Amino acid sequence: MSTPAPDEALSVDTVLVPVDGSDESIDAVEYAVAIAEEYEASVYAVYVVGQDVVRAVEDGAVDAEEVSSNSTSFMEDVEPIAEAHGVALNHSTAYGFSTTRKTQHPGSVVLDTADEVDADFLVVPREPMSESGDVLAKAAEYVLLYASQPLLSV
């Protein structure tokens, strides 16, 4: 019995990457695209909206359409990264927090999305912890602890 080559041992059809519009999330998209290209897979990006923005939307201080527009604009900026490598990129937006659901936080949103899109691999940006309140830093800690899929923290 032969041992499979490293690239044969792992089958990847969908790479999930959480993003928030930061430079770190652009870097994560680049890594996700590189992995997807290697495995002839697609990338699914979930734009995770932070706590302050969610509260502002719920309080009526920020229009939900504006939040949607910002996430769409960011995705339009990163689509050329995937296109340059011939990788399909799909995306959605999710609130990383809820004032009515205690269990909804950035990490659970990432893992729930991974299950929904049947992601085989996760690429999680880790923003510097000195910037308190960053949505992706909070997600990364949780995802690193609880993900069942292989993952890369960048």
Image (tube, grey):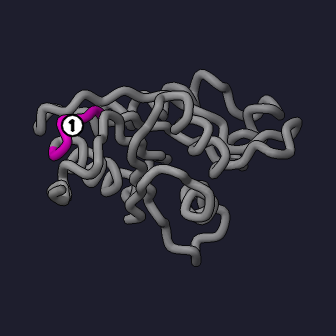
- The residue lying furthest to the front in this view is 1
- The residue lying at 58 percent from left, 71 percent from top is 131
Is the C terminus in the top left, top right, bottom left or bottom right quadrant? Answer: bottom left
In what quadrant of the picture does the N terminus appear? Answer: bottom left
Residue drawn at point x = 42 percent, y = 29 percent: 91
Question: Outermost residue, top direction?
Answer: 65
Q: Inspect the image, locate mark 1, and give the three-letter code of the amino acid beneath it.
A: Ala
Q: Is residue 112 visible?
A: yes
User: Magenta part of the protein: which range?
Assistant: 38-42
Please tell me in which quadrant of the rendered image residue 150 appears: bottom left
- x then y, percent, for residue 148: 53, 51
Relative side of 100 to 135, left or right: right
Q: Is residue 111 magenta?
A: no
Residue at 17%, 42% (x, y): give it: 37
Percent position of residue 111, x then y: 59, 44
Residue 130 locus on image (x, y percent): 58, 78
The quarter holding residue 56 reads top right
Is 27 placed above or below 57 here? Answer: below
Residue linked to disc 1: 82
- In the depicted view, which residue is nearer to us: 131 or 98? 98
- Is any part of residue 77 visible from this angle? no
Task: Report the side of 42 relative to 108 (left or right).
Answer: left
Q: Secondary structure at mark 1?
A: helix
Provide residue 20's location: percent of width, then percent of height: 49, 47
**Marker count (numbered):** 1
Relative depth, front residue between 104 and 54: 104
Which residue is located at x 55 percent, y 56 percent? 136
